[in-house]
Image: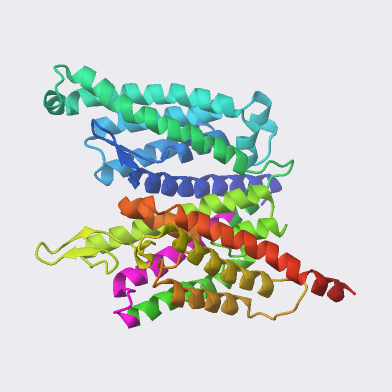
Amino acid sequence: MSKQSLNSNRENILRISTGGVCLALAFVLSQLKLFEMPMGGSVTPASSLPIIVYGVAFGPFWGFVIAFIFSLLQLIGGWLVTPFQVFLDYTIGYTALGIAGFAALKADARAKVPGALNKFRGASILKILGFSVIAYIVRWLGSVASGVIFYADYAAEAGYDNALVYSMVYNGSFLLVDLAILAVVLVALYMVIPSSEKDNTIATVQKFTAEFIGTFTLVFLGCGTAMAVGCDSVNGGGYILTAFAFGLVIVAMAYSIGNISGCHINPAVSLAMLISKKMTASDFWGYVVFQVLGATAGAGLLQYIFKQSGKIDMTGVYDAEAQKMTAWGLGANGLAGVNGNVVTGLIVEAVLTFIFVLCILGVTDAKFKHGSFAGIVIGLALVLVHILGIAFTGTSVNPARSIGPALFVGGQALKDLWVFIVGPFIGGAVAALAYKAISKSKEDKADK
């Protein structure tokens, strides 16, 4: 096989595999409901973003293919009403988004800039936002056209005599909010993705994907165990099982994805590595984004599986008479164990994270030989902090692990979420600074 054929096959594999990841991310994001609009309809966290990025990277034809497949998946899943809506609303709108992304590329960047991720960085962020606005108008027109048919009955109930006017206002209201969210996320993503003269797409995607898989597994198995067996002080067996579930996931992931990304699967750990100058700022933001996405996907799949199987979420509220869950827990963190005291919750999370991250920094320090047992030690350290922390906060020590379940649970879990972001970040940062201070003289001796 010629070198040209190998390169062509490599590009096709990259297009298809990246397309699969974009479809999965778009689907997960489309199922998240940030909040309900007054007129109805749920705002999702920029579910169109993967389509735009894909359009930038691979051009309008592949952007259309992904948009069309995503629309069909929405139809099969029952989130769209008829094939008519697929074409008028989603396919036209998402294809416009894909083309918008590609159009935002600078003319010379389309041919000369190597790699999908570099192409995104080679585009003008202002042009991406500008073309996205145009694409959203196209999508809005498609939504209005389909809404005239499907919202006729709802228009009268809402006090509108004309279904067209109701459809324009209804679709426009949540699409404007979605566009605002999209703009914020696009800017953040533009800052995250590194730019390089070389094509570093595959290496970067590999690391970010590994972090996505690792954090997904942590939430799916750790929180899933808590949901299945319970983890309150009365149910002692479930308490210990939950602690070991989280620790064993770290052991498993350390020896699988550890060679690829270092197996952080925790933004607090990534922050400590950034402070310790063991990773770049661009990698740090990329790790955090994909860790949160992985945790969110894990929590979403857990809720789906428990719902479909009729399984009781032991961390939620179950109505025995109605035989249904009245409130999902999903193993989310909370402040009930500290009587709602925010300061106490912050202290617990910061101290536990400090202990956990300090262990990671010590056992992975390349200057000192600890053999191949680092993964086991780190896993047991996570078990240790869980044994105490579950009784107080449910033990987060990991912002991504808390964000995923909280997005689906909502309510108080979402209100208290900032505690489980700030606390672990403080603990991780202090651990990095403390380890650097206490190991400095030892490092000097080791160098001699």
Asked if residue 224 lies left or right of residue 150, the reply is right
Determine whether 99 is above or below 315 in the image: above
Asked if residue 186 lies left or right of residue 34, the reply is right
Residue at 24% across, 34% down? 40
Point out residue 431 in the picture as x, y percentages from the top left corner: 64, 65
Asked if residue 91 lies left or right of residue 277, the reply is left
Q: Is residue 133 magenta?
A: no
Count every numbered label the image shows and give the total: 0
Question: Which image quarter: residue 180?
Answer: top left
Residue at 56% across, 24% down? 127
Q: Quadrant of the C terminus?
A: bottom right
Determine whether 439 is above or below 324 in the image: below
Determine whether 110 is above or below 360 in the image: above
Q: Which of 297 and 400 is in front in this view?
A: 400
Q: Nearer the viewer, residue 164 or 82?
A: 164
- On the question of residue 145 being in view, the answer is no
Question: Which image quarter: residue 268?
Answer: bottom right
Residue at 67% across, 63% down? 432
- On the question of residue 337 being in view, the answer is yes
Point out residue 340 in the picture as x, y percentages from the top left corner: 36, 60
Q: What stretch is highlighted in magenta?
A: 208-236
In the orientation shown, which residue stands out farthest toward the right? Answer: 448
Point out residue 261 in the picture as x, y percentages from the top left corner: 62, 61
Question: Which image quarter: residue 409?
Answer: bottom left
